[in-house]
Amino acid sequence: MMNVKKQLASLAVIGMMSMAAAASAFASGVGYVNFDTLISSHKDYPKVSAQMQAAIKKADEEFSTKSANMKTDQEKRDLARQLNQRITDLENKLVVPMEKDVVQSVEKVRKEKNLDCIVVQGSIIAGFENATDQTQDVVAVLKK
């Protein structure tokens, strides 16, 4: 159904800025973080990841079992929609609070380092040499 780690990373968007804002910010302090590393470093990640994977496996099994007896594609689509909604609801309950914690930790490091912004690694198009990797500093905050 979905790769949990990729899904977690895709759900989180930090520091989106217009190109003009980004260009002017490079003269000041810009940091970047590897969001996958931050999510997987979160204290709740192993538990959340296991719960999400178990829920996805259960949904897959439930779909296989129930859809085998369904006569129409519409019934199968409705079942798939229902199971996907269940996964989305669980994601909102488990993943979103973890992401918020990561974002708060990024903001804490940004303030401590007096940086103008921290962006997701790979989002800087020009001026990368002026940006500093803040990933491990945020990991340290997450471990506190």
Image (cartoon, rainbow, N blue to C red):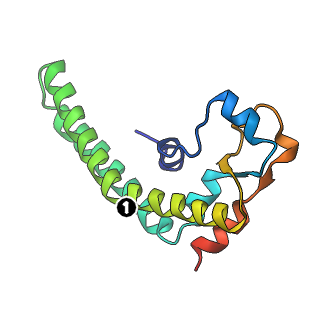
Q: Quadrant of residue 26?
A: top right
Q: How many marks?
A: 1
Mark 1 closeness class: few <14, some 14–19, many ≥20 residues within 10 Å: some
Q: Is residue 69 above or below residue 120?
A: above
Q: Position of residue 91 (x, y in %)?
A: 35, 51
Q: Is residue 51 left or right of residue 29?
A: left
Residue shown at 64%/64% (left/top)?
Answer: 111
Left or right position of 34 against 39: right
Amino acid beneath label 1: Gln
Give the percent coordinates (x, y) of residue 103: 53, 57
What's the residue at 45%, 61% (across, down)? Answer: 98
- Residue 105 occupies which quadrant of the picture? bottom right
Q: Quadrant where the C terminus lies?
A: bottom right
Query: In the image, is residue 73 above or below residue 125?
Result: above
Q: Secondary structure at mark 1?
A: helix
> Which residue corresponds to the image point at 59% horizontal and 66% vertical from the top-left?
108
**Quadrant in which residue 124 is drawn:** top right
- Residue at 82% x, 41% y is 128
Q: Which residue matches tag 1?
A: 51
